[in-house]
Amino acid sequence: MADEEKNLVEILEANNLIDMAKYITYVSAPQAGAIATFAGTTRDTFEGKTVVELRYEAYVPMAIRCIKSICSSARSAWNLHSIAVVHRLGTVPVGETSVFIVVSAVHRADALDACKFLIDELKASVPIWKKEVYSNGEVWKENSEFKERRLELGKKDGVCNRGEVLVKTHDRKTCCGTKVKVDDEEIGDISAGK
């Protein structure tokens, strides 16, 4: 079976619970001595505010493509047997799971490291958006991993020179390949003919 065939990536529509047993069964194999899991659940408080629920939206085709790319990156770094990644959309009440990742490998270190990499990359780069609903309001949230990635890429990497924007690429494993940063002000300067 090809590596791609050992990956299961799903985005569940609203009101569908994650069947964790299904995904654990998918990655189970006699040669897999380790299965690592991560379950992201809705907690009841955030910075002293009472959380009622989370609401997720996504650009599904791109999210699936990005998650598959992250799986490929994980396979290139660790010796993995199978990977399953599932994320819910819509409302996820307190105590319920919104994202579940399962990785199997011959050895635990590969499974554990890959599982951490998968959730960190998913949170940093996949187009899935989260709104936290509190007892007294709501707010769209950026994941801390996304903020860190944006700051990392936001350093002055590009310079505008006679209508050309030069950018420096970053050799970092991300869902959609190499990332570049172009300063919006420099684009404005180019379009204004400066």
Image (cartoon, grey):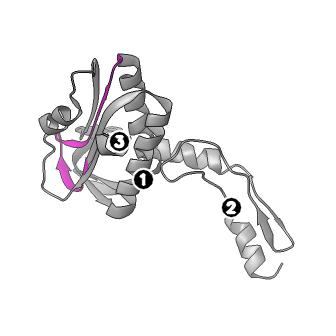
Q: Quadrant of residue 96?
A: top left
Q: Is residue 105 magenta?
A: yes
Q: Is residue 171 left or right of residue 127?
A: right
Look at mark 2 in the image and give the residue it sits on. 182
- Position above or below: 68 against 6: below
Query: What's the residue type where badge 1 is placed?
Result: Cys
The residue at 49%/35% (across/down) is 76
Instruction: Report the quarter where the N terminus lies.
Output: top left
Query: What's the residue type where badge 3 is placed?
Result: Ala
- Residue 55 or residue 118, whichever sits in front: 118
Q: Main secondary structure of the magenta part?
A: strand
3D distance between C-alphas at marks 1 and 3: 19 Å
Q: Earlier in the sequence, mark 3 or mark 2?
A: 3
Q: Residues within 10 Å of mark 3 (few under 14, many from 20)?
A: few
3D distance between C-alphas at marks 2 and 1: 21 Å
The residue at 81%/82% (across/down) is 193
Region in magenta: 87-107
The residue at 44%/36% (across/down) is 74
Q: Quadrant of residue 118?
A: top left
Q: Residue 34, image x and y in percent?
A: 29, 20
- Position above or below: 17 against 139: above
Instruction: Report the quarter where the C terminus lies.
Output: bottom right
The circle drawn on residue 173 is none
